[in-house]
Amino acid sequence: MVFQHPITRTLTETDNVLFCSMTMNPQPLHLDVEFAAKSEFGKPIVNSLLTLGLMIGISVYDTTLGTTVANLEMTEVIFPAPVFHGDTLRIRTKVEFMRECVSRPSAGIVKFRHRAFQQEGLEVASCLRTAMMHRNRGAGASE
């Protein structure tokens, strides 16, 4: 199953500064225009953890809203290209694996491959997320 999430989001300088402040990340590559201008990017880049959080967050409405028991792991996290202020991200999610949960019969394990693309189609982030989900026991099933 593949989801092309309809919600997109343009990342702003304010988003980036606020996120860096909230997470206590003083990296000048994210916050200092003069410092970033001397970098290989030539301008500030968006904090990669903001990109990761947004990528997963945008997927929630279509995939896991109200059904997640717990996120178990995030692996294979990559950022193949930087995100800049003003970039608009769109997200695609593929369900790669599902199985029953051995320790909780009312739950299952799902692996999601999340991928983020900026407005020109360049992939900027990807991760494999494993989550424990409530199982759908069908219409009329008793709790």
Image (cartoon, grey):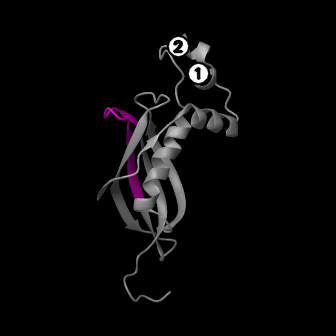
Furthest toward the top, the residue is 38
**In the rendered image, which quarter is residue 14 located in?**
top right
Describe residue 20's horizontal placement relative to residue 58 as left or right. Answer: right
Q: Residue at x 50, y 37 (%)?
A: 11
Label 2: which secondary element: loop
Q: Quadrant of the N terminus?
A: bottom left
N-terminal-most mark, 1 or 2: 1
Q: Position of residue 42 (x, y in %)?
A: 49, 15
Determine if the magenta segment contains residue 120: yes
What residue is shown at x 40% (from left), y 81% (from top)? Answer: 137
Q: Label 2: which residue? A: 39
Q: What stretch of residues is rendered in magenta?
A: 110-124
At horizontal 44% and vertical 60% (from top left) the residue drawn is 61
Q: Quick check: 74 above or below 26?
A: below
Callout 1 crowding tier (Cα within 10 Å): few <14, some 14–19, many ≥20: many
Q: How many marks?
A: 2
> Where residue 57 sits: x, y (%)?
49, 51
Where residue 87 appears, as percent x and y from the top left, is: 43, 33
Name the chief secondary structure element in magenta. strand
Q: Which residue is the site of mark 1? A: 29
* Residue at (50, 42) in percent of width and height: 52
Q: Position of residue 25 (x, y in %)?
A: 67, 31
Q: Which mark is residue 105?
A: none
